[in-house]
Amino acid sequence: MIQVTVDEARCNGCNFCVEFCPTSVFDLAKCNGTRVAAANRPEACWACMTCVGKCPEWAITVSQTAPPKRYVDDENERAFVPLSDEEHETYTTYSETLERVLKLRWKPVAVTLIPKGDPMPHIPVPRVRLRYCQSLIMARRGKSILMPPASHACMDGTSILGLTKIPEKLATGDVYMQLGKVANKEAALRLVQERPTLPEESIGATLATPLEAVVMRPDIVAIMAPPETMMWLCMSSTYYTGERSSFKMSSYNAQCVETTVYPYTTGEINMSLGCYGCRAISDLGDDAMFMGIPIDKLPLVIEGLEHLGKKAIPDARSRVYLPPMI
């Protein structure tokens, strides 16, 4: 249950909430002869918190009444077939190798995009709505999170990931222009039209777990780490070929598009610098970058990493190439 409250005494009628809300929760109304915001359609709120962050007077409160811990329906759970012990051991070994060789601070995250109608695992659904990027950040800390559409807080992300249809304000790029992230409407529209998306309402839920705790085959493994770590991952992926890597980045929709959809649709590893959205709503450090590795590419990365971990990585990190005095 989401509640949207406007403090009429603080509201200055600036209209920001009306402009920024992607689902048109707000209107301007008259109160004692002045214009104030009114949350006339609270049922449309996704708790994305954009209105709260953009209100210059801090007049808007969005609160979520957390239901008891819950899971998806029993019928789907009974139909779900878990991974075999052998498959689970394989992914656990991959995770151990990544953490050991790279000395990762955060756990590699396994992402599965569960097609609509497919059985779902017995994994907790969050008690409040979260953004997709928040679920990945929680999974890197050891949490397992299953999120059907109603558990997501960002309609931009859900439409990109194929969970929902895209609201008109997002489809036209109006919200991006209002946020001041692009120069004009043409640039905003191009940003939306050129990014890859999955077919509308084709995905029933996103699942994010630590790679060591997978319960079903991942589609992508997401890694959040500093640039030096990403360098070794890139080298690992080309250990046998020596080829150069090319990545698709825009600094918009980092976790949903760049870390997830690009690798998912192309089968290729992709890198991301992050975006203002995922950085604004999390504890991500300024030095964090992101990589999405399609699961079919992960064995090659692991094999290359094992080789580099024998000498190249330890030598470089211990600075053995420096002369004794400089």
Image (spheres, helix red, strand yellow):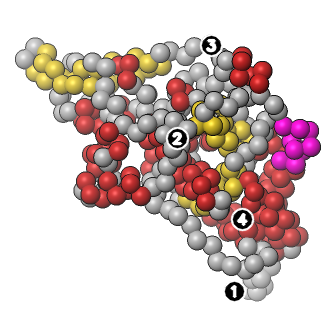
Q: CA distance from mark 2 to mark 3?
A: 27 Å
Element at badge 4? helix
Which is more N-terminal, label 1 or label 4? Answer: 4
Q: Residue at x 51, y 44 (%)?
A: 199
Element at badge 3? loop
Q: Which residue is mark 2?
A: 162
Looking at the picture, does residue 232 appear above or below residue 128? below
Which residue in the rendered view is the most extreme toward the left? 33
Q: Residue at x 57, y 51 (%)?
A: 261
Which is more N-terminal, label 3 or label 2? Answer: 3
Q: Which residues are magenta?
A: 83-91
Badge 3 amino acid: Pro
Classify residue 190 by image quadrant: bottom left
Which is more N-terminal, label 4 or label 2? Answer: 2
Q: Which residue is mark 3?
A: 68
Q: CA distance from mark 2 to mark 4?
A: 28 Å
Q: Which residue is mark 4?
A: 233
Q: Nearer the viewer, residue 316 or 73?
A: 73
**Circles 4, 3 touching at the beta carbon (< 8 Å):** no
Which is more N-terminal, label 2 or label 1? Answer: 2
Q: Is residue 126 left or right of residue 219?
A: left
Q: Is residue 71 left or right of residue 15?
A: right
**Circles 2, 4 touching at the beta carbon (< 8 Å):** no
Q: CA distance from mark 4 to mark 3?
A: 40 Å
Q: Is residue 52 left or right of residue 257?
A: left
Which one is in front in this view, the residue at disc 1 or the one at disc 3? 3
Q: Nearer the viewer, residue 118 or 139?
A: 118
Q: Nearer the viewer, residue 140 or 118?
A: 118
Q: Residue at x 48, y 32 (%)?
A: 153
